[in-house]
Image (spheres, helix red, strand yellow):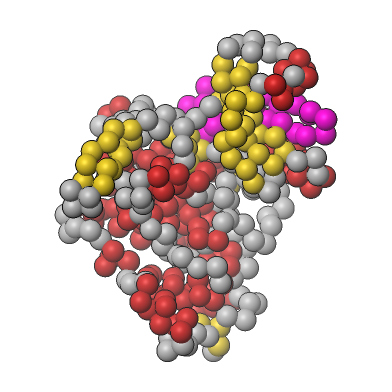
C-alpha cells in the first residue's frame, strides 16, 4: 500500500504541471515517487461546501472501485484520497485530453464517423454500467470524456489549408463523478451543464437516469459536426431551439410544468423577435444536419433521435442503444472495449 501520508507531506515539491482549474480547485500532474508513476491529482479548495462535495464524489468513486476493480467499464480509476492541510485530494490514473479539448485543438474539425461510432459505443457502455448500479452521472459532456491516450497523426487538408489531427487510439474513460446521484438519493432540481440538459430538467418535472441518455444524444451530435447542438444560456431560448430541431414539446409536459415558459400549452416565444430570428437562423430540423445520406449517417441520426425523445420514458435505454445498428460495424475487439483507431 502506498504511503499517501508521506506523499502528501511533500506534495507541493512533486507537482509537474497544472492540468486544469475550476471553481472547486485544480487538477495537477504529480509524480508518485514510490511507484515512479505519474498521477492526476484533484486538489479541492479548503472550503466547506467543496470539501463536502469531494466527500460525496469519493463515496461514488469507492463504490465504482468496489463494483469494477479493474476499471473494465471505463470509469476513471481512483488510486486513493487524503486530506492535505484541509484540502481534499483525490489521486487518479493519468489520462489524455478530453474529447472536447482535442476537438478545440483541432479547430473544431468533426471526428470521423468511425471515431464517433467507437467513442459513442464506449460512452453508452460506461454509462449503462452506472445505470445498472442505480447511479446517474448527471454531468455528461465532452469535457468529461477523456482519451486514454490522445496522441495523434497529422495530415494536411488542402481544402481547409491547415493541418488536421486524427487521434491514434479512440479508447476513452469517463471522469467527474462530483454530481453523480444514486437512485435513492435526493435529486437536485437542476442538473447537467446547460447545453446537455434534458427538457424535463429545464421544466422542473423531476428526472431520472434518462437525463444521461439525452446528454449522450447531444454529445454524439457534437462529435459528428464539431458544433454544440443547443448553443444558448437561456431556458426559454433553449426550449425554442429544441422545438426548432426536434419539433413541438408534448402538451403533457407543457401542462405539468410550473415554469412560466408556456401560454395555453404552447411555448411563449416570438419567432419574429431578434432572439426568434437567431434561433431560426442557427437551428434547423435534426435530419438537415446530416452530412451524407449514406446508411451509416442515417443510422447515427436514428440513434440520436431515439435519445432525444422529449418524454424520458420514450427514450432508448443505453442497454438497447448498445444493440443499435449504428454500432454493428464496430470491429469485434471494440465490443470488448479494446482500443480502436
Residue 132 percent location from the top left of the image:
53, 40
Name which residue lies at 42% across and 78% down.
278
User: Image quadrant of residue 52?
Assistant: top right
Along the viewing direction, whichever of 97 and 61 lies nearer the viewer? 97
Residue 319 percent location from the top left of the image:
42, 44
**Magenta residues?**
68-91
Could you tell me which quadrant the N terminus lies in?
A: top right
Could you tell me which quadrant the C terminus lies in?
A: top left
Name which residue lies at 18% across and 48% down.
158
Please indicate whether residue 301 sits to the left or right of residue 77 in the image. Answer: left
User: Image quadrant of residue 69?
Assistant: top right
Please indicate whether residue 3 sits to the left or right of residue 248 in the image. Answer: right
Q: Residue 161 lies in magenta, yes or no?
A: no
Report the number of discs: 0
Q: Residue furthest front?
A: 161
Along the viewing direction, whichever of 113 and 266 lies nearer the viewer? 113
Name which residue lies at 23% across and 58% down.
291
Instruction: Check the image and report above or below for 190 versus 28.
Output: below
Residue 287 percent location from the top left of the image:
28, 65
Instruction: Check the image and report above or below for 54 versus 104.
Output: above
Instruction: Check the image and report above or below for 270 versus 85.
Output: below
Q: Is residue 90 visible?
A: yes
Please indicate whether residue 98 sits to the left or right of residue 326 in the image. Answer: right
Residue 276 percent location from the top left of the image:
44, 82
Name which residue lies at 27% across and 29% down.
332
Q: Is residue 60 visible?
A: no
Amino acid at each position: 500500500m502506498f504511503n499517501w501520508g508521506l506523499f502528501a507531506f511533500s506534495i507541493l515539491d512533486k507537482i509537474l504541471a497544472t492540468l486544469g482549474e475550476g471553481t472547486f480547485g485544480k487538477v495537477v500532474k504529480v509524480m508518485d515517487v514510490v511507484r515512479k508513476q505519474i498521477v492526476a491529482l484533484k486538489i479541492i479548495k479548503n472550503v466547506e461546501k467543496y470539501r463536502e462535495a469531494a466527500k460525496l464524489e469519493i463515496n461514488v468513486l469507492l463504490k465504482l472501485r468496489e463494483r469494477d476493480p479493474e476499471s473494465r467499464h471505463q470509469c476513471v480509476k481512483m488510486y486513493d484520497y487524503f486530506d492535505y492541510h484541509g484540502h481534499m485530494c483525490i489521486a487518479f490514473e493519468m489520462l489524455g485530453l478530453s474529447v472536447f479539448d482535442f476537438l478545440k485543438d483541432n479547430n473544431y474539425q468533426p471526428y470521423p464517423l468511425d471515431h464517433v461510432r467507437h467513442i459513442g459505443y464506449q460512452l453508452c457502455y460506461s454509462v449503462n454500467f452506472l445505470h445498472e448500479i442505480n447511479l446517474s452521472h448527471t454531468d455528461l459532456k465532452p469535457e468529461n470524456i477523456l482519451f486514454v491516450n490522445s496522441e495523434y497523426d497529422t495530415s494536411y487538408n488542402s481544402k481547409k489549408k491547415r493541418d488536421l489531427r486524427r487521434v491514434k487510439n479512440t479508447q476513452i474513460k469517463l471522469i467527474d463523478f462530483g454530481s453523480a446521484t444514486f437512485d435513492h438519493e435526493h435529486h437536485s432540481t437542476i442538473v447537467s451543464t446547460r447545453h446537455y440538459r434534458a427538457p424535463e430538467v429545464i421544466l422542473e418535472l423531476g428526472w431520472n437516469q434518462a437525463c444521461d441518455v439525452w446528454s449522450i444524444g447531444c454529445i454524439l451530435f457534437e462529435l459528428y459536426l464539431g458544433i454544440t447542438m443547443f448553443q444558448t444560456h437561456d431556458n426559454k431560448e433553449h426550449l425554442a431551439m429544441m422545438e426548432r430541431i426536434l419539433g413541438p414539446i408534448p402538451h403533457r409536459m407543457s401542462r405539468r410544468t410550473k415554469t412560466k415558459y408556456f401560454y395555453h400549452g404552447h411555448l411563449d416565444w416570438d419567432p419574429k423577435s431578434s432572439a426568434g430570428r437567431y434561433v431560426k437562423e442557427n437551428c434547423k430540423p435534426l435530419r438537415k444536419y446530416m452530412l451524407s445520406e449514406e446508411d451509416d449517417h442515417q443510422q447515427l441520426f436514428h440513434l440520436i433521435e431515439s435519445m432525444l425523445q422529449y418524454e424520458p420514458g420514450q427514450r432508448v435505454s443505453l442497454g438497447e442503444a448498445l444493440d443499435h445498428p449504428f454500432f454493428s460495424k464496430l470491429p469485434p475487439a471494440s465490443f470488448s472495449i479494446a482500443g480502436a483507431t
